[in-house]
Amino acid sequence: MRVARNLQPVTPRGSNRAARSASLAALALALAAAGCGRRATAEDCALIVDRNVEVELQAMKVTDPAVIQRHKAELRRDLKDKLDTCPGKRITDAMLTCVRQAQTSEELDRCTRW
């Protein structure tokens, strides 16, 4: 989820929706490419989406828990169809550990490109 430079959350429309779709597409490819490991649960998939929101908002110094939760809910709603197809894809525990520990968008990208 992207936020504007003035710390105002961007609504989930237009190019922002395209960026979200691209991020989830990368997630889907990473999960499919993982090959070994185990099958992802709905919770695993939600964790990856939630961490993306948290990391991006933290980078913009947005720390209000209500704002963060609202953005998580919006992104999950916007990506519902894609999130529904995520469970069952192959994932590794190392990938999830990496996602949990990532502090930047670049680190998250590396986690999901294994």
Image (cartoon, rainbow, N blue to C red):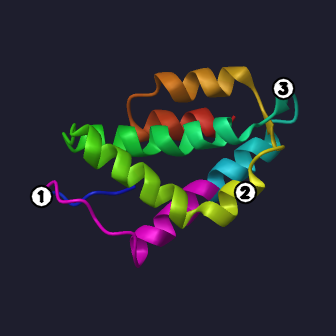
List the single residue furthest toward the front: 66
The nearer-to-camera label among 2 and 1 is: 2
Q: Is residue 61 left or right of residue 105?
A: left
Mark 2 vs 1: CB contact within 8 A = no
Three-letter amino acid code at disc 1? Answer: Asn
Residue shown at the point (68%, 61%) measured from the top left: 82
Earlier sequence position, callout 2 versus callout 1: 1
Three-letter amino acid code at disc 2? Answer: Asp
Read off the residue under disc 2: 84
Please tell me how crowded label 2 is: few (under 14), some (14-19), or many (20+) other residues with Cα within 10 Å. Answer: few
Q: Is residue 74 above or below residue 111?
A: below
Q: Give me the C-alpha separation between circle 2 and circle 1.
A: 33 Å
Q: Give me the C-alpha separation between circle 1 and circle 3.
A: 41 Å
Earlier sequence position, callout 2 versus callout 3: 3
Q: Is residue 10 left or right of residue 51?
A: left
Magenta residues (range): 6-24
Q: Give me the C-alpha separation between circle 2 and circle 3.
A: 20 Å
The quarter of the image holding the N terminus is: bottom left
Q: Is residue 81 above or below residue 87?
A: below
Residue 2: image x %, image y %? 34, 57
Read off the residue under disc 1: 6
Local secondary structure at mark 2 = helix
Three-letter amino acid code at disc 3? Answer: Gly
The quarter of the image holding the C terminus is: top right
Quarter occupied by residue 105? top left
